[in-house]
Every structure is written in C-alpha cells, then in structure tokens.
Image: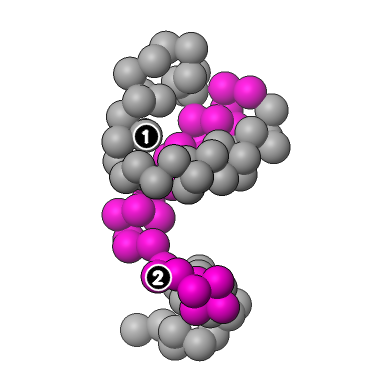
Amino acid sequence: MADAHDTTTLDGWLATFAAAAGATPPTDDEVAQLLDLARHAAHRAVRPTAPLACFLAGRTGRPVAELLALVEADPRLRAED
C-alpha cells in the first residue's frame, strides 16, 4: 500500500493537495473518469484543453461520470481514437 503522505505518488499528492484545499481526494473511479475526460479533451483539441476541461467539470458540481457520459455521447467532443 502506498504511503498517503508520499507526495511523489498519485495518491499521496492528491491526498496532500486535497487536505490543503479543504476537499476530499477523488475516488479511484473518479480519478479514472477524470483521466478519461482529459484524454478525450487532449486528443480532440490541443493539449491544454485537458486540464481546463477537468477544471470546468469541477466547477459544475456534477458527478464526473455524468460529464464523461456527456462527452462520450457528443461526437463533437469525443476523442478520435
């Protein structure tokens, strides 16, 4: 098991950042969904779209799975894998 305080790992960094920001870290499912959302954005447009899409997703307050489904349903937003 990874050390939750080891900020060189994904889990450790997210746990530390979330605590500093006064939030709970994302679940494993949310991490996977956010990375998938970022992948769609980066492959469909320019790379800076990925973190900005995740930022916008966070601003909505909607579940990540719901927003990922929105992207996957709209051919204009899907990655062309």
Q: Which residues are magenta?
A: 18-45
Q: Earlier in the sequence, mark 2 or mark 1?
A: 2
Q: Residue furthest top?
A: 75
Q: Is residue 60 magenta?
A: no
Q: Residues within 10 Å of mark 2 (few under 14, many from 20)?
A: few
Viewer-closest of 61 and 69: 61
In which image quadrant can residue 13 be found?
bottom right
Q: Is residue 49 above or below residue 62?
A: above
What is the three-letter code of the residue carrying label 2?
Thr
- Give x and y (percent) for residue 17: 56, 73
In which image quadrant can residue 72 be found?
top left
Task: Residue at 31%, 29% (x, y): give it.
Answer: 69
Q: Which residue is mark 2?
A: 24
Task: Residue at 62%, 40% (x, y): give it.
Answer: 52
- SS of the residue at dot 2? loop
**Tag shown at residue 67:** 1
Q: Is residue 42 above or below residue 81?
A: below
Task: Residue at 48%, 19% (x, y): give it.
Answer: 77
Quarter the N terminus occupies: bottom left
- SS of the residue at dot 1? helix
In which image quadrant can residue 45 be found?
top right
